[in-house]
Amino acid sequence: MPRLVLSIDAMGGDDAPEVVLDGLAIFVKRRPDVGFQLHGARDRLMPGLVKRNLLPQCEIVHHDGTISMSDKPSMALRRSKGTSMRGAVEAVKTGAALAAVSAGNTGALMAISMLVLRKMDGVHRPAMTAIWPTARGRCVVLDVGANLEADADQLVTYAIMGAAYARAVTGEANPSIGLLNIGSEDDKGTDTLKLAAERLGDAELGLNFAGYVEGNDISAGVVDVVVTDGFTGNVALKTAEGTARLVAGYVRSALTSSLLAKCGALLAKAGLEGLRRRMDPSSVNGGVLLGLNGVVVKSHGGTDAEGYATAIDLAAQLAGSQYREEVAVGLARLASVPPAEEVVT
């Protein structure tokens, strides 16, 4: 019997269940010790499992219903019973699995996860994270879309959750934390940011707060955790993804513009392959809903098999970590610290 079991929303995503099963096949080659509960239509899943020789690792939990990518969260929540997404999350609540993975509708997954798993004590709103490639390796950015606004207390909570998450996924023992702002000077930014910065700098919280960071500091890897509200974080994330695609297109166009350029590309093939791997979004696929009583990983809906395998790997990492216990300790410490004085401008 596998020591670690993950639940999978096998019907969630643009190309489910084929991409989901292909991702499982890639992951199982790396981690044959992990088992899976696959939630979805048995008649669509069984042939694929047999074809990929995945039956020894997988159990199918049949669900007739699915949630479409276009469903509004409120509608999806009302009709979620009997769906593969709801089943995958409920498996975490019952203890049948230690983490869930879905590439389905983000808003629906957030709503269902909050309903089924509930928020941790001390969490105002869960936050969505993103792993960001940087010049130094990787950093954690949150929130990237779960909540459009965040007050100072929520930003402090994000920092506590982000630091614990960074320790689990990057191995950094004492991750540095930065507040995303329009400048690094103390007098820059909104009153909300200034109040959050004052609280984060309190030594009693035990956080490695590095102060304000700007947008260009994210990719530079100036800090290990970047904290912001969901509106700003989502805009930054989509801008970075668009820029990466633009640069990749420029490089591809330049290397195929002439016979001489093509010859140069052939000579530089090994280096270009390394660049492609570093810029491949599949290598950082997977966002986590932090602040819930359970682990839920959101894969990009349009990811490929490698990307889905990356999301599963992230779920396995977190399922085997103590990050939620660390978050609970941090939130308890926050509750004992007197609030900072309101900033007057």
Image (cartoon, helix red, strand yellow):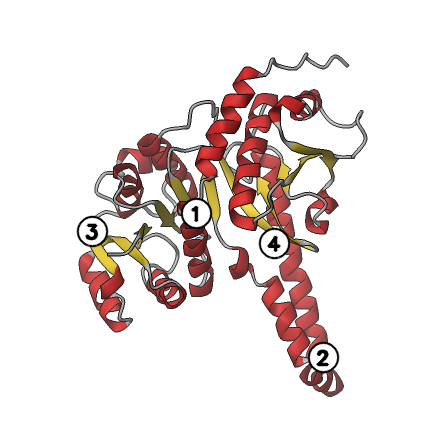
Q: Can residue 201 be seen in this view?
A: yes
Residue at the image position 62 percent from the left and 61 percent from the top: 245
Figure check: 148 above or below 202: below
Q: In which quadrant of the rendered view does residue 196 lie?
A: top right
For residue 81, which numbered disc appears in the image? none
Residue at the image position 31 percent from the left and 45 percent from the top: 85
Residue type (three-letter) at the residue carrying disc 1: Lys
At numbered mark 1, what does the secondary structure look like: helix, strand or loop? strand
Figure check: 77 above or below 7: above
Residue at the image position 48 percent from the left and 24 percent from the top: 124
Q: In which quadrant of the rendered view does residue 181 lie?
A: top right
Mark 3 / mark 4, whichever is N-terminal: 3
At numbered mark 3, what does the secondary structure look like: helix, strand or loop? strand
Q: Mark 4 points at which residue?
A: 241
Mark 4 / mark 2, whichever is N-terminal: 4
Q: Name the residue under label 1.
A: 298
Mark 1 / mark 2, whichever is N-terminal: 2
Give the class, few, some or many, for how many residues have Cα within 10 Å of label 4's Cα (few <14, many ≥20).
few
Q: Cα distance, mark 3 to mark 4?
A: 35 Å
Give the class, few, some or many, for how many residues have Cα within 10 Å of label 1's Cα (few <14, many ≥20).
many
For residue 61, which numbered disc appears in the image? 3
Give the x, y percent position of residue 308: 42, 59
Q: Check if mark 3's residue and mark 1's residue have beta carbons within 8 Å.
A: no
Q: Check if mark 2's residue and mark 3's residue have beta carbons within 8 Å.
A: no
Q: Nearer the viewer, residue 302 or 186?
A: 186
In-image side of 205 versus 102 (left or right):
right
Q: Check if mark 1's residue and mark 4's residue have beta carbons within 8 Å.
A: no
At numbered mark 4, what does the secondary structure look like: helix, strand or loop? helix
Residue type (three-letter) at the residue carrying disc 4: Glu
Q: Name the residue under label 2.
A: 257
Mark 1 / mark 4, whichever is N-terminal: 4
Q: Cα distance, mark 1 to mark 2?
A: 38 Å
